Amino acid sequence: MPRRSSNSILSSASLPLTTLSIGLWEEDVSTDRIRGDAVMGQMYGLTDAEVAEGISRSHLFSIFHPDEVSRDPELRRSVREQGGLFVWEHRIMPAPGIVRWVLVRGHYERGPDGRMRGRGIVIDVTDTRADGHVDGPSRYLAACETLGSPAETMADGALKLWDLMHQLDDDSAARLRPSLKALLFELGRQIAAALPDGQVAAASRPFRDPKLH
């Protein structure tokens, strides 16, 4: 797939999604398949079929800003091979002339069948960038052993509430969804703001995310 051209400035008006966009993703490392929900698909410019059937990691990386692909490859490889929590704030380019900053938070772990799988959330944080500027260093934080900041602990709790929300009737879930999205977005923003550049630090205990379906 041809790489998208870069763009240093993006106005909020050009974004088809709002800052409260929160998508879900999962990856089966052994089969090289990454799947997501409809929000994640729209955020990354993917079709419903692509997020349902799954795309390869190389396909996903073709959506990244060119500068991001070469950053922190050893940290990314370590988490996918050994397991652990990661938080990554970086740029994606879902369409020509469109650049977004996203915050991805997730956890990789090996199941009883020996296969490594990852799950997590992705939040569009573009509008938190001052004056719409999207250039700047990405930040990747990963750890196999985790201690947990208050924001990380609260995020785990909020994600458990998000999972439980799907057990409610449609009307009750619809009333709660905006508040939980706002909470998750603010916690994601605080986690992103606290990431130390170029450091491997202790994050939180093993991540539990809401189910995709």
Image: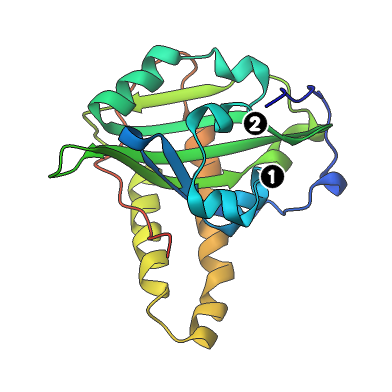
Mark 1 lies on a secondary structure that is loop
Residue at 42% over, 74% down: 166
Q: Is residue 4 above or below residue 129?
A: above
Q: Position of residue 92 (x, y in %)?
A: 66, 32
Q: Residue at x 51, y 84 (%)?
A: 170
- Please say if 65 is above or below 175: above
Q: Is residue 36 visible?
A: no
Residue occupied by mark 2: 63
N-term mark: 1 or 2: 1
Instruction: State which quadrant residue 96 falls in.
Output: top right
Residue 45's tag is: 1
* Amino acid on which disc 1 is placed: Gly
CA neighbours of label 1 inside 10 A, class few (<14), some (14 to 19), many (20+): some
- Mark 2 crowd level (few <14, some 14–19, many ≥20, 10 Å Cα): many
Task: Report the number of numbered marks.
Answer: 2
Q: Please state which amino acid type lies under the numbered disc 2.
A: Ile
Q: Is residue 26 left or right of residue 104?
A: left
Q: Is residue 115 left or right of residue 210?
A: left
Who is closer to the viewer here, 206 or 113? 113
Image coords of residue 140 (percent x, y): 46, 23
Q: Position of residue 138 (x, y in %)?
A: 58, 22
Determine contact: label 1, label 2, CB under 8 Å.
yes
Image location (x, y in percent) of residue 82: 23, 25
Residue at 52%, 23% in the rendered image = 139
Q: Nearer the viewer, residue 77 or 208?
A: 77
Using the numbered discs, state the Cα–Cα distance from disc 1 to disc 2 in whole angstroms.
8 Å
* Residue at the limit of the structure toward the left, as seen here: 112
